[in-house]
Image (spheres, coloured by chain):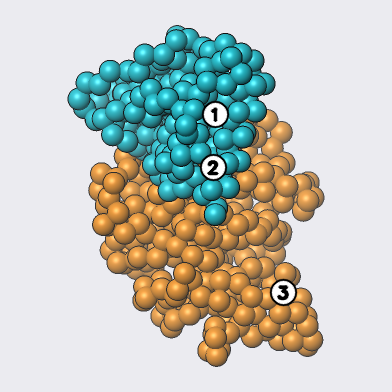
Chain colours: A orange, B cyan
């Protein structure tokens, strides 16, 4: 696979992993948008990221290493919850998935799969209904929001004692970075944040870097990580078996319903951006 | 696939209320059987989000997608979208249904819209399905001269007092799946014959 010519995709920031995973004196090679990317961490802890002979820009926001193969017009998106001192930052990845990163984001935005893919954890077949929620494209900040989402969950989080109606909000900040805000099981007036940073290696190969900022003083890190990894591995089974592996944008290729409002808006937003990386070629109509 | 009936699996390998994924000429299909015993051959893709239906689950006489539980009746029509329990599902939401039939211990399908006769086969003892890394012409060539061509995608071999009926389908270039049913003889003898056929065919294909 060769490097992409998708300018919009190139001019974005991408997470390459949690800072804690890059150790002093070590070197790692990964992929980004079809190109080899080399990460060198000096013995003094200084990090350099290169693609071929090119030195790439780096950022270290939210405990992650970010880079870009192009020239991002904006800094890495703001995540205000990262400045709240009582939140715990927990890294739950990486998870490698043989699918378009756009499919990963869309799956993350989806409520209707909870009773089937995460049976008796995030949903139950007895209560599969997705109530009407609201979606919005905030043009001033170029973000997508889904709000007033509610779903009955038998075990909403690692610390959940029993079933509850969970409230969700979703915030899509770039085509490959999304946050979900969810009723905190131990603090009813605040929201846990679960972020999904997707590193697109190839059009149909991705690494998910799930990251949590939670208000939970009862679960251990291992419990939180174990819970999220179980959820992500269940999603991986679905994602690797969707056809095509790339995200189709042309109408008629798939069948959205009212529960898919987030997905409909996300796909419209990608079209508006003329986004191509991870998208099915329109000529591939079966 | 052509207008002819093509054998895709042994009937015994798709018990009631299960699914089986098959690849036919690079296309992903799902075979599934309802509680009523009826076998179905569909495109292995839910029209909602493209999820492979072979990972789904059969309940009674409906195939349900693993991703969101969309439920499809035997005729292919989606009858229930669990996220919207009160929705009268539009008739346009349908799985891709292919013609399916069972004969001689095998499940057959065809993609053409003209009528075609199913091969006439006695009800033998199903042996197994076997993948061979060779195209069908190579397999037929190594089986000659004992071979009797008995259908478009069917041949028979006489071996150790038994007639072994072998249906085949092309999986992809250089890969063929055989489905064997024995009339008389033992399953062990038929299995040995098939393994021998595989060894010879793969040897010639690799040469």
**Can you identify the residue that label 2 sits on?**
B201
Determine the chain carrying the residue at label 3: A
Mark 2 touching mark 3, by CB under 8 A?
no
Q: Which residue is mark 1?
A: B129
What residue did someone put label 3 on?
A22
The 10 Å Cα crowd at callout 3, few under 14, some 14 to 19, many 20 or more, is some
Residue B204, image x, y percentages: 53, 48
Image mark 1: chain: B
Look at discs 2 and 1 and give the one toward the viewer: 2
Around disc 1, counting alpha carbons within 10 Å, would you say few (fewer than 14), some (14 to 19), or many (20 or more)? many
C-alpha span from label 2 to label 1: 16 Å
Q: Secondary structure at mark 3?
A: loop
Find out whether the residues at labels 2 and 1 contact each other: C-beta distance under 8 Å.
no
Disc 2 is placed on an element classified as helix
Spatial CA span between label 2 and label 3: 51 Å
Q: Is residue B45 left or right of residue A87?
A: left
Mark 2 is surrounded, within 10 Å at the Cα level, by few (under 14), some (14 to 19) or many (20 or more) other residues, namely many
Question: Eyeballing the image, is A230 above or below B105?
Answer: below
Disc 1 is placed on an element classified as: strand
Residue A111 visible to the viewer: no
Q: Nearer the viewer, mark 2 or mark 3?
A: 2
Residue at (42, 25) in percent of width and height = B148
* Residue lying at the far left of the rendered structure: B114
As rendered, which of B66 and B116 lies closer to the eye?
Answer: B116
Q: What numbered label is drawn on residue B8?
A: none
Query: Can the viewer see residue A31?
Result: yes
Residue closer to the observer: A20 or B93: B93
Q: Examine the rendered structure and indicate whether residue A86 appears above or below residue A190.
A: below
- Name the chain letter of the residue that bears numbered label 2: B
The answer for how far apart the CA atoms under marks 1 and 3 are is 49 Å
Tell me whether the residue at label 1 lies in contact with that at label 3, contact meaning CB atoms closer than 8 angstroms.
Answer: no
């Amino acid at each position: 696979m060769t490097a992409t010519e998708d300018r919009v995709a190139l001019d974005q920031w991408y997470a390459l992993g949690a800072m804690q995973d890059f150790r002093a004196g070590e070197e790692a090679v990964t992929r980004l948008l079809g190109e080899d990317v080399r990460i060198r961490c000096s013995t003094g802890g200084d990090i350099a990221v290169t693609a071929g002979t090119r030195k790439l820009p780096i950022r270290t926001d939210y405990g992650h290493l970010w880079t870009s193969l192009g020239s991002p017009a904006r800094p890495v998106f703001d995540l205000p919850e990262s400045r709240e001192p009582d939140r715990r930052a927990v890294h739950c990845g990486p998870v490698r998935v043989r699918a378009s990163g756009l499919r990963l984001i869309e799956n993350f935005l989806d409520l209707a799969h909870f009773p089937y893919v995460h049976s008796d954890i995030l949903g139950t077949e007895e209560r599969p209904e997705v109530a009407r929620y609201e979606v919005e494209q905030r043009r001033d900040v170029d973000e997508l929001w889904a709000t007033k989402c509610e779903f009955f969950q038998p075990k909403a989080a690692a610390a959940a004692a029993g079933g509850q109606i969970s409230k969700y909000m979703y915030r899509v900040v770039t085509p490959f970075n999304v946050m979900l805000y969810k009723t905190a099981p131990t603090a009813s007036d605040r929201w846990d944040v679960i972020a999904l940073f997707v590193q697109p290696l190839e059009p149909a190969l991705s690494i998910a870097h799930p990251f949590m900022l939670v208000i939970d003083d009862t679960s251990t890190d291992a419990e939180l990580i174990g819970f999220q990894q179980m959820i992500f591995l269940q999603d991986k089974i679905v994602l690797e078996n969707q056809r095509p592996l790339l995200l189709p944008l042309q109408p008629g290729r798939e069948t959205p319903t009212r529960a898919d409002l987030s997905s409909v808006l996300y796909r419209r937003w990608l079209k508006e951006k003329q986004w191509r990386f991870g998208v099915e070629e329109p000529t591939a109509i079966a | 696939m052509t207008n002819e009936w093509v054998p895709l699996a042994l009937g015994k390998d798709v018990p009631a209320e299960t699914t089986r994924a098959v690849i036919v000429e690079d296309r992903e299909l799902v075979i599934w059987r309802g509680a009523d015993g009826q076998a179905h051959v569909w495109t292995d893709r839910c029209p909602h989000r493209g999820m492979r239906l072979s990972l789904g689950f059969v309940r009674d006489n409906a195939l349900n997608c693993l991703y969101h539980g969309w439920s499809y009746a035997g005729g292919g029509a989606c009858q229930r979208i669990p996220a919207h329990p009160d929705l009268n599902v539009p008739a346009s939401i349908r799985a891709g249904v292919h013609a399916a039939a069972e004969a001689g211990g095998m499940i057959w399908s065809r993609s053409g819209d003209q009528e075609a006769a199913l091969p006439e086969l006695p009800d033998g003892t199903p042996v197994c399905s076997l993948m061979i890394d060779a195209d069908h012409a190579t397999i037929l060539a190594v089986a000659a001269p004992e071979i009797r061509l008995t259908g478009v995608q069917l041949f028979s071999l006489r071996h150790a007092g038994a007639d072994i009926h072998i249906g085949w389908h092309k999986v992809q270039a250089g890969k063929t799946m055989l489905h064997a049913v024995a009339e008389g003889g033992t399953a062990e003898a038929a299995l040995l014959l098939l393994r021998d056929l595989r060894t010879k065919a793969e040897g010639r294909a690799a040469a």
